[in-house]
Image (tube, rainbow, N blue to C red):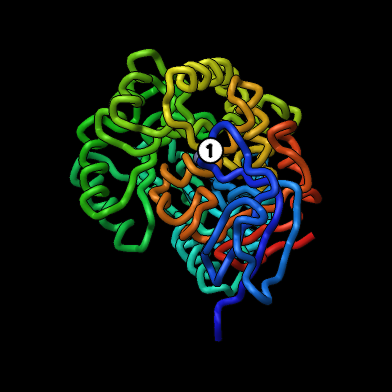
């Protein structure tokens, strides 16, 4: 059978051109890929092609930081009491569907128990269930007593978000074990955080030698490294070690920012996580320790984000979806927060498409609308450059396409 041909017409935001959109644009899709793109009248419309028309066509969005087993529950304790691996897995199928229905065609899944992320990724890849393309880290690595300590030690649960590895040899072994189990990248819990019961967000967890071993080992085996980083010393050691994405980046000074620029380290800001914890607080059921820690970090976080942006650090959009009150399918709220913190709507769309694809190492396949790329795109009934919040309104996302296949049509 010959490849199916589709034509989409509208104003194109291609993810490449920072200044302008392509008005009266046409995209031709054959099979999984974009075979032609240009101005109406200049592009040959293949015979028998199905034609779709919309206001704005843009690349499918990419969320570089999600947790597919969580869905905004205020704390882990209640969730753990009600859940086992099967519960998490069944729920994750629903969350994956909500994600693609919101226009997110690719996500980086940075922490779920066991083989959940891997199995979900593969089921979507095989077309068994709908969902975004997933890159998963499986369990993140944590030191004993580090940010991976989400439950008191006397509670045993299937939801072990963290895999414990201490010292260079355990870290090396853990990286190899994860890669052997089929993960796409390694996630390191490099410093303390907000949602665990033990750490201080600013406290460094992994030492430089451990970070270096993890990164070298992952890179040697062809995998990238994402690091959960809140405190400043941990940030600098992560950058020195050569990690690929610095996630959260609560405390960044001028030196750290310059180091990121020199090394080409991406920042995945996740402004949504602290925002939602701050909005809902203890009255929303979030544990008091987390609300307190959040108060310590939230202002520093937006300041660091703005400084990094102004200095020219590469910023890839990520939400930390799954953390309290951050629910799958509501990922585009992050874009509004990025605009509220100095970025232009066009820059934010770039951060959610092209730059994110680079952070994930998928830039040769997705992230822009170009000839030869996979046809991952959305049609929005509105102009996101005039109002970035339109991307949060699912009823306006008229079509979601992944690899040339229409997954959602409204
Ligand atoms: Zn996270």
Outermost residue toward the bottom in this view: 1
Task: Give me the residue at 52% from left, 59% from top.
Answer: 133
Q: Position of residue 93 (x, y in %)?
A: 62, 63
- Splitting the image into 4 quarters, where does residue 324 fall? top right
Q: Residue furthest top?
A: 254
The residue that label 1 is drawn on is 17
Instruction: Name the residue rendered at 59%, 47% in the picture.
Output: 61
Residue 128 location, x and y as percent?
A: 58, 74
- Residue 407 appears in the picture as rendered: yes
Q: Is residue 118 left or right of residue 24?
A: left
The residue closer to the viewer here, 233 or 307, is 307
Residue, x 25% and y 45% (percent of image)? Answer: 171
Query: Dot 1: few (<14), some (14–19), or many (≥20) neighbours within 10 Å?
Result: few
Give the vertical position of 5 relative to 276 (above or below): below
Quadrant housing the N terminus: bottom right
Give SS at disc 1. Answer: loop
């Amino acid at each position: 059978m010959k490849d199916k041909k589709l034509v989409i017409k509208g104003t194109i935001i291609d993810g490449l051109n920072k200044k302008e959109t392509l008005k009266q644009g046409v995209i031709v899709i054959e099979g999984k890929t974009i075979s032609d793109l240009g101005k109406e009248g200049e592009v040959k419309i293949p015979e028998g092609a199905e034609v779709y028309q919309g206001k704005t066509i843009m690349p499918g969005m990419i969320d570089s930081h999600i947790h597919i087993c969580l869905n905004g529950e205020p704390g882990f304790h209640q969730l753990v009491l009600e859940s086992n691996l099967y519960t998490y897995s069944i729920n994750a199928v629903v969350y994956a569907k909500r994600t693609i229905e919101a226009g997110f065609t690719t996500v980086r899944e940075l922490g779920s128990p066991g083989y959940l992320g891997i199995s979900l990724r593969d089921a979507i890849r095989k077309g068994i269930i709908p969902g975004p393309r997933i890159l998963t880290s499986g369990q993140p690595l944590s030191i004993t007593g580090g940010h991976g300590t989400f439950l008191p030690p006397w509670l045993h649960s299937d939801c072990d978000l963290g895999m414990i590895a201490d010292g260079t040899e355990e870290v090396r072994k853990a990286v190899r074990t994860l890669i052997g189990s089929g993960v796409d990248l390694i996630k390191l819990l490099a410093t303390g955080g907000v949602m665990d019961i033990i750490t201080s967000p600013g406290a460094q967890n992994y030492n430089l030698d451990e970070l270096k071993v993890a990164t070298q080992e992952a890179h040697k085996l062809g995998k990238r490294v994402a690091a959960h980083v809140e405190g400043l010393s941990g940030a600098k050691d992560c950058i020195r070690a050569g990690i690929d994405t610095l996630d959260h980046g609560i405390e960044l000074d001028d030196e750290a920012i310059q180091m990121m620029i020199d090394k080409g380290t991406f920042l995945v800001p996740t402004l949504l996580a602290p925002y939602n914890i701050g909005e809902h607080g203890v009255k929303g059921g979030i544990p008091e320790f987390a609300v307190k820690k959040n108060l310590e970090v939230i202002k520093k976080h937006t300041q660091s984000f703005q400084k990094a942006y102004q200095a020219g650090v590469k910023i890839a959009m990520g939400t930390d979806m799954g953390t309290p009150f951050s629910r799958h399918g509501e990922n585009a709220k992050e874009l509004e927060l990025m605009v509220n913190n100095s970025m232009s709507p066009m820059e934010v769309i770039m951060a959610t498409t092209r730059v994110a694809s680079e952070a994930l190492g998928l830039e040769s396949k997705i992230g822009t609308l170009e000839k030869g790329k996979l046809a991952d795109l959305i049609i929005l009934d509105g102009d996101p450059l005039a109002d970035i919040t339109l991307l949060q309104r699912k009823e306006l996302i008229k079509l979601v396409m992944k690899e040339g296949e229409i997954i959602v049509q409204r």
